[in-house]
Image (cartoon, rainbow, N blue to C red):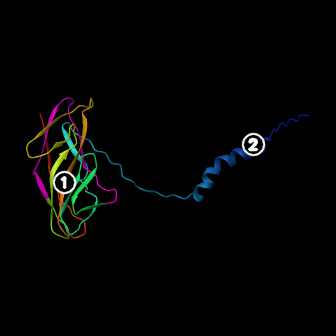
Amino acid sequence: MRTSHIICPLPMQRGLAIFALLIAPAAASPALAQGSAQSEAEAIVLRPLSFFKVNDLDFGSIIASGTSGTVRLAPDGTRSRTGGVTLAGGGGEPARFAGLGTPNRQVNISLGSNSIWITGPGVRMRVRDFEIGSTPTAILSTSPTRFRITSPLGNYNFPVGGTLEVGANQAPGDYSGTFTITLNYL
């Protein structure tokens, strides 16, 4: 069995209901909590024929011994060692650069110096044999290495690895230095 209900509010009740709906937002406003927060928005706007650093060259954690050795970080991120150096953890990351240029344009890439010194709490260490990730991998030097921008949009990126010379009994701590990459668009 079904029942149906029809509600017909009286005119006075209708007026009260409309009045209640109109004042409800105003009455509720003082009870609302207000707060504000700020955030930053960032963007990199590239001009044609430009590039920037995405991340730094990081040889990762290593353990020195009484014998000197080297740590090689390839552009693909693999690490290897020689001598008395032990690789600790899975760290290590090649430097990465990116930019924007004209598609099919050739670019010369070179270093400011073939080797650099990094400093920290102990004797400084040398970084040498910088390598650019390309096919095949090329050793970078002050003489330019050439690549072509193959992306139809003109964007490109490349990793850079290198070899770190670790001294015997190298003091523990963080070591850092800088190197310069130069691009010349042809």
Disc 1 residue crowd, few under 14, some 14–19, many 20+, Cα 10 Å:
many
Q: CA distance from mark 1 to mark 2?
A: 84 Å
- Report the residue marked by disc 2: 14
Q: Which residues are magenta?
A: 88-116
State the residue in front, 161 or 52. 161
The residue drawn where x is 80% and y is 41% is 10
Q: Residue 54: where, in percent of width, then height? A: 27, 48
Q: Residue 76: where, in percent of width, then height? A: 27, 45
The residue drawn where x is 13% and y is 39% is 145
Helix, strand or loop for disc 2: helix
Q: Amino acid at mark 2?
A: Arg
Q: Amino acid at mark 1?
A: Thr
Q: Quadrant of the C terminus?
A: top left
Residue 105 on the magenta segment: yes
Q: Quadrant of residue 69?
A: bottom left
The residue drawn where x is 11% and y is 46% is 141
Q: Nearer the viewer, mark 1 or mark 2?
A: 1
Residue 108 on the magenta segment: yes
State the residue in front, 172 or 88. 88
The answer to whether residue 136 is above or below residue 25 is above
Point out the residue furthest to the left here.
143
- Report the residue marked by disc 1: 163
Helix, strand or loop for disc 1: strand
Relative to residue 133, is residue 143 drawn left or right? left
The residue drawn where x is 20% and y is 36% is 48
Q: Residue 95: where, in percent of width, then height? A: 24, 50
Q: Quadrant of the N terminus?
A: top right
State the residue in front, 20 or 162. 162
Q: Quadrant of residue 98?
A: top left
State the residue in front, 46 or 150. 150
